[in-house]
Amino acid sequence: MTIAARGQTDVGRKRDHNEDSFLVDEGLGLFIVADGMGGHAGGGTASRLAVETIQSRVRVAREAEPELFTSPAPLEESSLREVLRDAVESACQNIYQAAQGDPALAGMGTTVTAAVLAGRNTYIAHVGDSRCYLVRRGRIYQVSEDHSLVNEQLKAGAITPDEARHSRFKNIITRSVGFEADVAVDMVGLEVDPGDRLVICCDGLSNLVDDQEILEVAGGTSLEAAPGKLIDLANERGGDDNITVIVVHIG
């Protein structure tokens, strides 16, 4: 298996600063999108701390147990899942502690959607409403599940999918990293195939560009051009939030 990835972020058309952070680390096989919240200083600080902490913890784990990455166990047996979960939990604690020490950062938090790949094994850690999609053989699958008020209403049958797309509550999330000292991290494991692509993005993209359009761009555009083309689509439709996209190609 080979991995190639490209990531890009943009402030959008309505915001005066960018609170998103992202990581493309092909050497670690680690890819992260974090969408921060909590004021002008807090959101950017939270997302940056999340990315830095997760990368550091995964790197330490690889140095201690390189076989986790070079000779991975079967998907359901690998402890890499717990390495990634622990890394996100550590990020949560670091962000929370940083906020306690600085009133300007009080209440900050961030979404986190992180994927780590080792051979065919892929693990996704997810908190919030940033997303991970799998593009495979002309189809797109949303791997993560939004932790949002609108998604809770949708699952309960209180609103329709169309109402969800246009809800004024669609930016309210029900879970974030760092707002409290601990967080429940959703974990998903899957086996990737050659030709698959992963798309990791914040809601600045998914609120304005639908799944079919993401499929068409991510599946039918060069890896180098895909993130920028998706960002352009979101900006053409108003760009009302920061927009961050990573596209990962499995060769």
Image: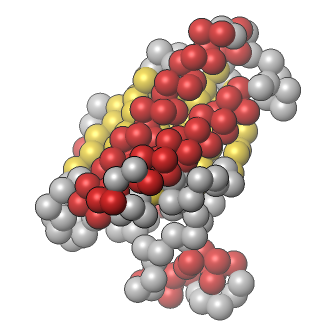
The residue positioned farthest toward the bottom in the image shown: 158
Classify residue 158 as left or right of residue 169: right
Residue at 70%, 45% in the rendered image: 187
Report whether residue 212 is seen: no
Using the rendered view, name the quadrant where residue 152 is placed.
bottom right
Task: Quarter of the image for the N terminus: give it.
Answer: top right
Give percent across and percent down for residue 245: 37, 46
Residue 52 sits above or below residue 47 on the image: above
Classify residue 123 as left or right of residue 214: right
Give percent across and percent down for residue 147: 59, 65
Residue 164 sits above or below residue 135 on the image: below
Residue at 51%, 60% in the rendered image: 179
Give percent across and percent down for residue 85: 67, 39
Residue situated in front as seen by the camera: 74 or 111: 111
Residue 147 sits above or below residue 27 on the image: below
Report whether residue 61 is seen: yes
Using the rendered view, name the quadrant where residue 6 is placed.
top left
Residue situated in front as seen by the camera: 5 or 77: 77
Residue at 42%, 46% in the rendered image: 98
Residue situated in front as seen by the camera: 226 or 27: 27
Count the numbered circles shown.
Answer: 0
Give percent across and percent down for residue 13: 16, 64
Residue at 60%, 9% in the rendered image: 63
Using the rendered view, name the quadrant where residue 110 is placed.
bottom left
